[in-house]
Image (cartoon, helix red, strand yellow):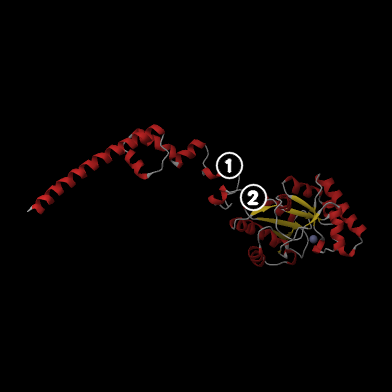
Amino acid sequence: MRGTKFFGRGLLGAFCIAMLSMALVGCSLIREAQFVGMTGGGSGDTATSSSNIESGQETAVFADADPSEAKQEAGTAVHPSEQDGGKLLQPPSKPKNDTNEKKDTKSRPRVALTFDDGPDHKYTEQILDILKEYDVKATFFLVGTQVKKYPEIAKRIVDEGHALGNHSWSHADLTKLSAKDVAQQIDKTQQIIKQATGVSPRLMRAPYGALSKSVLETIHKADMKHVAWTVDTKDWAGTSVSDMYKNVMSNTRKDGIILMHSFGGRKDALDHTVKLLPKIIKDLQKDGYDLVTVDEMIDSGDYKTSAIK
Ligand SMILES: [Zn+2]
């Protein structure tokens, strides 16, 4: 009997405690609502939000924390993470990765697209049109005799923000020339490029990539760096678009330098280069690469490729 009585009292006690608890919780919710209202909210806490839904005042306060409202207030239809860093002009195909966007963009791996043997009126212009469409900058290694024929195309390359390199006067194998003749091949080309574009390249690429110790010394004496490549598309030989695409996408690494041509090669071979270019621009960017000029790569001060000497 005593046990039953005690049990009955226990139940009553538990009921009272439960009622008291509910009353206390109710009070604390009201207090919390008042506190949030006074400080302007900002908390994304779900429980707090739901407790405020009935009050028009509180809902207004919570609008501050709503991302869609924040967009309107900023006056632009962009994600908040894109509001700095000059990202607004990037084409829609540019890969979006919010985590990376917040980091220093310098940490993104770089790749340089390079085009040899131009300028000319046919392929160089088509390549420039594609680069403009995708807002990508590349590096053109120009041959002196071609600059003499098409100075206005050389000028267009510079006007559209691309970098220039020297590719000798007559596309000679420099390893077969005297140091004096090598120097002349370099100087004469520097002069005509300067005359056509106002720019003095600080990059040199020996025709065929044929380099000797003596040729490299002559290049360094001209205060220039030699730039080879890490991926050879062999576009001049008429390599198919799909073979070149596979080669580029599977062999490109951080600080890669991709060799293509904007003039010369076998008949119609560079039609393939023109078809390849938009595909590799899109997919290298999708893989997270920044497409930069070789000058930009060097100016970064932390490039890691033995292709630049
Ligand atoms: Zn060449």
Task: Pick the quarter of the image with the C terminus.
Answer: bottom right
Q: Secondary structure at mark 2?
A: helix
Relative depth, front residue between 131 and 190: 190
Eye-nearest disc, 2 or 1: 2
Q: Ligand 1 lies in which image quarter?
A: bottom right
Relative depth, front residue between 46 and 295: 46
Q: Amino acid at mark 1?
A: Asp
- Neighbours of disc 2 within 10 Å: few (<14), some (14-19), many (20+): few
Q: Residue at x 56, y 47 (%)?
A: 102
Q: CA distance from mark 2 to mark 1?
A: 15 Å
Q: Position of residue 49 (x, y in %)?
A: 36, 41
Q: Which residue is mark 1?
A: 84
Q: Which residue is mark 2?
A: 106
Q: Is residue 248 left or right of residue 144?
A: left
Image quadrant in which you'd find residue 18: top left
Q: Position of residue 215 (x, y in %)?
A: 86, 60
Q: Is residue 291 left or right of residue 193?
A: left
